[in-house]
Image (cartoon, rainbow, N blue to C red):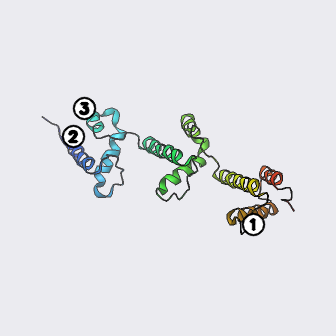
Amino acid sequence: MVSKINKKWNHRFNQLKRFFEKQGHSNLSARYKRNKSLGTWVVRQRVIKNTLSEEQVDKLDSLEFVWEPRTNSWNQNYEKLVEYFEINGNTNVPVNFRSDIPFGRWVQKQRRIKNSLSESRLKQLDSLNFIWDGNSFIWQNNFSALEDYMLKNKSTPSYKTNLKLYNWLNQQKRKLLNGKLTMIQTNQLENLIPAFKN
C-alpha cells in the first residue's frame, strides 16, 4: 500500500515528468509561475536529497534532474564560452552579446568575481586564455591595428585613410592630456610614434 506521503510525491513527480516531456528539462525554480507548488517541490527535492529513497533519486535522475543548479548553470555558460573561443579566437564576449545577453553578462561577472572563483574554475577559464581585463584587450587590439597600419603606410592614419584608427589615436591623445593612459600604454604609443606627446 502506498503511503499518503509517497502518493503526494508520485503526483508531483508525474507533474514534473510531464513538464520534462514537453520542455526537455526538469530544472524548475521556486518562481515557476505556471505551477509554483511544483517549482517549490523541485527546489525542496534538492534540499532533502539525502532523505529521498534510492528509487526516488533514480526517478528524478531519469528526468535529468539538476541537483546543483548553480554549478550546472556555470558549466553551461563555460561550454558557451568554449564555443565562442573556438569561433572568435578570444573570450572577449561583449556584455550585451546580441545572441545571448545573459551569457555576455556571465562573462563580465567572472571578471568581477575573479578573486572568489575556485581554483578549478580559474584554471578552466585560463585554459581559454580568458581575458580578465576586456578594456586592456580592446586597447591592445587597437594598438596592434595601428602598428600594422603604420608598417604598411609609413605614417599615422588620417580621417581619409582610416577613420576608425584616426579617431582611436586622437582619443588616446585626449586620454594622455587627462592622465587616463597607463604608463605602459603611453610608452607603447611613444615608441611607435616618437612625436605622440607633442
Residue at the far bottom in the pictured view: 160
C-alpha span from label 1 to label 3: 72 Å
List the residue tagged with mark 2: 5
SS class of the residue under badge 3? helix
* SS category of the residue bearing label 2: helix
Q: Position of residue 29 (x, y in %)?
A: 36, 50
- Residue 40 appears at what percent x and percent y? 32, 49
Task: Tell me the tag on residue 158.
Answer: 1
Badge nearest the viewer, 3 or 2: 3
Q: Residue at x 77, y 56 (%)?
A: 181
Nearer-the-camera pick, 168 or 112? 168
| Spot occupied by residue 150 in the image (x, y as percentages of width and height) | 76, 56
Figure quadrant of residue 46: top left
Report crowding for label 3: few under 14, some 14 to 19, many 20 or more residues within 10 A (C-alpha). few
The amino acid type found where label 3 is placed reads Glu
For disc 1, the neighbor class at 10 Å (few under 14, some 14 to 19, many from 20) is: few
Tag 1, which secondary structure? loop
Q: Are marks 2 and 1 in contact (CB under 8 Å)?
A: no
- Type of amino acid at the residue the image marks with label 2: Ile
Q: CA distance from mark 3 to mark 2?
A: 15 Å
Q: Nearer the viewer, residue 47 or 84?
A: 84
Q: Horizontal placement of 126 versus 50: left or right? A: right
Residue appearing at x 17%, y 37% in the figure: 3
In the orientation shown, which residue stands out farthest toward the left? 1
The circle drawn on residue 55 is 3
